[in-house]
Image (cartoon, helix red, strand yellow):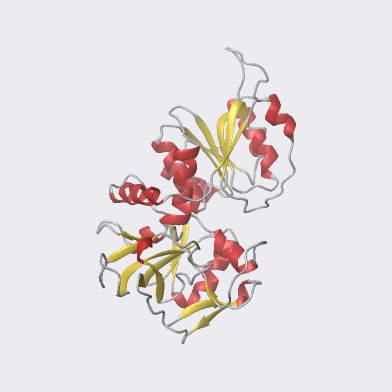
Amino acid sequence: MKAIVLNEHGDNDKLTLDSNFPDPKPGPEDVVVRVRASSLNYHDVFTRRGMPGIRLNFPVIIGLDVAGEVAEVGSAVKDWKPGDRVLVDPIDRVNGGLVGETTHGGLAELCRVGAHQLIKLPDEVSFAEAAALPVAYGTALRMMENVGRIQPGEKVLILGASGGVGVCAVQLAKLAGATVIAAAGSQEKADRLRELGADDIILYTEEDFVKAVHTRYGKPARRRSATDGGGVDVVVNFTGGETWVKSLRCLRLGGRILTCGATAGFDPKEDLRFIWTFELKIFGSNGWEREDLYRLLELVRSKQLKVLIHKQWPLEEGAQALASLEDRKVFGKVLVGA
């Protein structure tokens, strides 16, 4: 089969097209999925670069998110048959491991996974829509609903709003009845975020987002008062880096910050004074649960949630697809596949 293969850590040139990679064979409780679409995430960039504490058995086929049709089933598999439309939960919740990291992923024509990782795909949801969901939309759903518990009327500032997690977070905050303030790097992205439901846009390439929040929503007050005290209720920050302390400065007294990643740096400068002075709350959110994927599929099926796809690349150009994501030149999800 054809596959995009990583043989060693490094830059994007370490990803190569192998036209004769061995076809996967199912074990008794496995299935082989014919990949129709695979979604790339920043986790794939980290996998390619190498992450501290995580050792890979090379060669590795990256690509955590996989949707397609069952091609072959193991001898002990009873609930699935060839031709079934499926979404793969990338987390192996029985044996441990992660698709595209500890086992071969979706940048290939075929992908072997445990049968317990499969979720039936509704006819109303396309392979491309489904493949975009688990890592990015699943992470956003858990962060915004289960952990963050966004409430009607709250003011929510979302950094990184144009990426895969961000476009879902914008929609979920709007569905919850919040006022959504999205940070964007260009007017084009700003316009698209407004189409998704963002109530306000901060172009961080033209103005400091802290000053913008203070100007539009007031400065946070150090003491509870019925007449003063501005800021936003929630900041969604999965970039880290130099935006971390700035995010703290945007929050009202008792506000909360939600984080599920650190694409711009995991060890930012900290300023504890803002945390205790304004009684701030920091909530971390890690991944998704299986039931989150069922909820996402229903939200997409019922047209309550849009899946934003920047571009779907052919398998042969999988390395270029990852490069486009790494360069942060995308709006929504980057997909690979037929």
Rendered position, 179 above or below 297: above
Q: In this view, does 254 lie above or below 248?
A: above
Residue most toward the top? 226
Quadrant containing the N terminus in the rendered view? bottom left
Residue at screen point 70% across, 25% down: 277
328 relative to 216, above or below: below
> Residue 209: where, in percent of width, then height?
64, 38
Residue visible at 29% across and 51% down in the picture: 301
Farthest residue to the bottom: give it.
20
Q: How many labels does the image show?
A: 0
* Residue 109 location, quadrant: bottom left
Q: Quadrant of residue 230?
A: top right
Q: Residue at x 46, y 72 (%)?
A: 107
Residue 215: horizontal and vertical position, in percent?
A: 63, 28
Visible residue check, residue 184: yes
Q: In the displayed structure, does residue 83 sit left or right of residue 148?
A: left
**Percent of width and height locating residue 233:** 55, 29
Left or right for 74, reference 167: left
Q: Quadrant of the C terminus?
A: bottom left
Using the image as rendered, state which of residue 320 and residue 148 is in the foreground. 148
Is residue 192 visible from the viewing direction of this image? Answer: no
Q: In this view, does 157 lie to the left or right of 210?
A: left
**Viewer-proximal residue among 201 and 141:** 141
Place residue 36 in its image quadrant. bottom left
